[in-house]
Amino acid sequence: MAVSRKVRGFMDQGGWIRRMFETGIVLKARYGEDKVFDLSLGNPVVEPPEQFKRELLRLAEHPVKGMHRYMPNAGYPETRQAVADGLKADTGLPFTGGDVVMTCGAAAALNVVLKTILNPGEEVIILSPYFVEYGYYIDNHGGAAVVVPTGADFQPDLAAIAAAINPKTRAVIINSPNNPSGVVYPAARLRGLGDLLGQKQDENGSEIFIISDEPYRRIIYDGLTYPQVFPHYQNTVVVHSHAKDLALPGERIGYIAVHPSYPHREELVNGLTFCNRTLGFVNAPALMQHAVRALQGVSVDVADYQRKRDYLYGQLTEMGYSVVKPQGAFYLFPRSPTEDDVAFVDALQEWNVLAVPGRGFGKPGYFRVSYCVEDRDLEGAMEGFAGAARRFG
Ligand SMILES: Cc1ncc(COP(=O)(O)O)c(C=O)c1O
């Protein structure tokens, strides 16, 4: 067998999003591209902001000598400083470039953090519904994922997290705005989580990190100011990516930021830099590091996503779907009208609508729809949602 037993098992069991992708290819070949309404992917259809194009043109016309060479593994000092300046403005905390490591997106950043902090068998708490790759990333580095369900509002359930913590707990991964639910965690809940982890560290004589996965931090609605995690807990590591806020998922650019008051900050950053290198990423793409340096405060047009959210939320609730109204990211996570979320998603395919069953995120009985798509795909999917709602009552 070419593939290891473990990887074979993961490939067989996992990958609802990939399965939907493959179903989409089949349906599109059979019925035509414009007859299939694919709401299964988090791949934004919007183009990057104009400023990004201007940066690329500027770099092409005025190249910096040596700009394509190897560099320090943590990234260009100027880019790390620009990220730190942005974080300082957003959080009021005294970040410096030394607190930042540039990475190949959030996926690489999460792997680098987990590789750096995990001893074999240590546990990482993830909150369901969760981004499905977390389980694989934790496994990559010898850790064990411990799944703790969120409440009915998809907010972290502090009592349930407290009950799951033991001396082997090394980290809690949180993700706000959340994929797949779209909810944003309010400051009071983050403060509660910080207090809880601080208390558990003291009780267990252990060190527990919050790994805050924030690729959707700038995709928030209703005039909300992003509730930052950093102010509530010193042992916080934030992972960010420009995949969503600058619509650059294919360019693989993001970063890790360590709380400036974390007591072992220098050792941790050295470890992160070492793991960025030895996991084989070596460094984040040079051209992208040059390009995003001047774009730290820039983001895609969030008003357009909010308009799509309002349309989709309005339509689905009118049809009788039960949905927690999201305040960020670009997903809705409604309750499936039948407990069998796979049967429901299969039924949607009869109308050529693709969505992802909740069990793909550790939460059966729900389904995820992504609205980072063209309006015509959203509008075209409505007949299917209405038909499937009628079928399952
Ligand atoms: C919650 C979450 N974390 C991490 C990632 C990975 O982002 P990146 O493309 O920057 O690796 C995604 C991508 O969709 C995501 O939704």
Image (cartoon, helix red, strand yellow):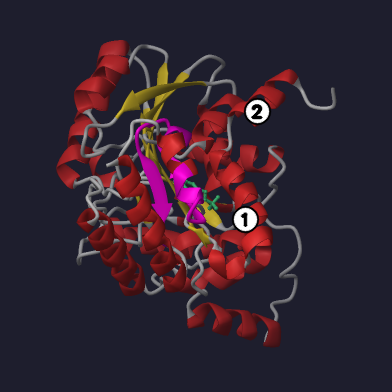
Q: For residue 112, which quarter of the picture?
A: top right
Residue at image coords 25%, 56%: 327
The answer to whether residue 214 shows anywhere in this view is no
Nearest the eye: 301 or 70: 301
Residue at image coords 60%, 27%: 13
**Where 180 sits versus 124, above or below?**
below
**Where 112 sits versus 20, above or below?**
above
**Residue 105 in picture, x, y percent from top left:** 56, 52
Mark 2, Cα crowd under 10 Å, few <14 / some 14-19 / many 20+, is few
**Which three-letter amino acid code belongs to the residue tagged 2?**
Asp
Which comes before the other along the chain, label 1 or label 2?
A: 2
- Which quadrant is the C terminus positioned in? top left
> Is label 1 in a helix, a strand or a loop?
helix
Q: Is residue 8 left or right of residue 338?
A: right
What stretch of residues is rendered in magenta? 347-371
**Where 244 sits versus 7, above or below?**
below
- Can you identify the residue that label 1 sits on? 27
Q: Are circles 1 and 2 on residues that touch, CB within 8 Å?
A: no
Residue at image coords 53%, 14%: 121
Looking at this rendering, what residue extends furthest in the front direction? 391
**Which three-letter amino acid code belongs to the residue tagged 1?**
Leu
Nearest the eye: 138 or 183: 183
Measured in 3D between alpha carbons, the distance from the residue under mark 1 to the one under mark 2, in whole angstroms, is: 22 Å
- Can you identify the residue that label 2 sits on? 12
Q: Is residue 364 left or right of residue 29?
A: left
> Is label 2 in a helix, a strand or a loop?
helix
Nearest the eye: 150 or 158: 150
